[in-house]
Amino acid sequence: MSRLEKDLGIDAGALVGAATSAGARAALFAGDGPYYHPVGREIEVFEHADRNGLPLLLKGPTGSGKSRFVERMAWATGRELITVACNDETSAVDLLGRYLVQGADTVWTDGPLTRGVRSGAIVYLDELAEARPDTIVAIHSLTDHRRTLFLDRRDESICAPPAFLLAASFNPGYQRGFKELKPSTRQRFVTLAFDYPREAVEIEILCGETQIDREIARRLVVYARKIRARTEFGLAETVSTRLLASAARLIRDGLPPRLACNAAIVQPLTDDPDICRALQDLADLSF
């Protein structure tokens, strides 16, 4: 029985399968643990994929809740979460493991992916497209019917237990050229598309995440939506819910709203002085 089932006295799987109403989804995410507010039917997709041993790919812009969703689901199902932040230096050896010299001996040390497969954890590869090609190839055998990890250096094959789940994320708006995931990789995953939530939901997220006053949350969200609509700014990334939450925390702690918007939203988004002024003007109008 998962932690969520113990806390709520329910059959979490049955509830998720029937979670078509906002009330049912809210009940599933009651209690302690990492805060996450469902924005669609992502819970249902997760649970069905999990039960069938299917890997999950979360795609969407930065700060849209991908990592927090995985954290919450790991907590709700009572499993260890092993997160790997991928970059262009992440190799297959980093994931699988290596031999290390310890005194007079040479000892094999499992990498995070190998540890996760052995223990039945959720392994989350954050920004998978940033990893080196050999890293991505190394996970292919885990993402099809084999669900097996091959350790060539040890001549060992590890069959993933039912509890093991491989999840990955990437930002399709940010990745370009060789950073894009190949179809041969993408089609191995069940995919959940994340985006910035609708206005009412984003207000609820800010209130739940930061305990900020609802009117302040509303103004922050309206401010963000104005920026997101202004494509002429040419921002590499627009205002994320994560940035709004940072601004809300600063305001709740007593920082003036306009200054909080500058420090938590305007400055992280751009270094262009003209765009900074334009973004700050919008903040001044909102507060």
Image (cartoon, rainbow, N blue to C red):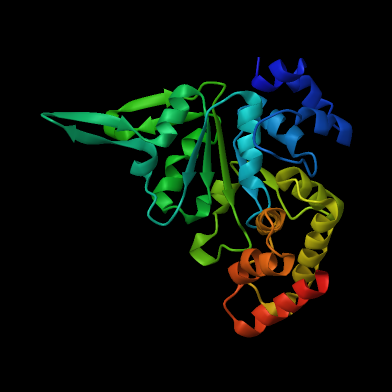
Nearer to us in this view, 121 or 247: 247
Q: Position of residue 265 (x, y in %)?
A: 66, 66
Nearer to us in this view, 2 or 49: 2
Q: Position of residue 122 (x, y in %)?
A: 54, 31
Q: Is residue 65 positioned above or below 14 on the image?
A: below
Q: Is residue 236 visible?
A: no
Nearer to us in this view, 29 or 136: 29
Q: Is residue 88 left or right of residue 166?
A: left
Q: Quadrant of the C terminus?
A: bottom right
Which residue is painted at 55% across and 66% down in the image? 176
Q: Position of residue 168 (x, y in %)?
A: 56, 44
The part of the image, by quadrant, that contains residue 182 is: bottom right
Looking at the image, the residue that sits furthest to the bottom is 274
Q: Is residue 213 visible?
A: yes
Looking at the image, the residue that sits furthest to the front is 254
Q: Position of residue 69 (x, y in %)?
A: 66, 40
Q: Is residue 12 left or right of residue 268?
A: right
Q: Is residue 98 left or right of residue 241?
A: left
Which residue is painted at 59% across and 36% down in the image? 55
Q: Quadrant of the N terminus?
A: top right
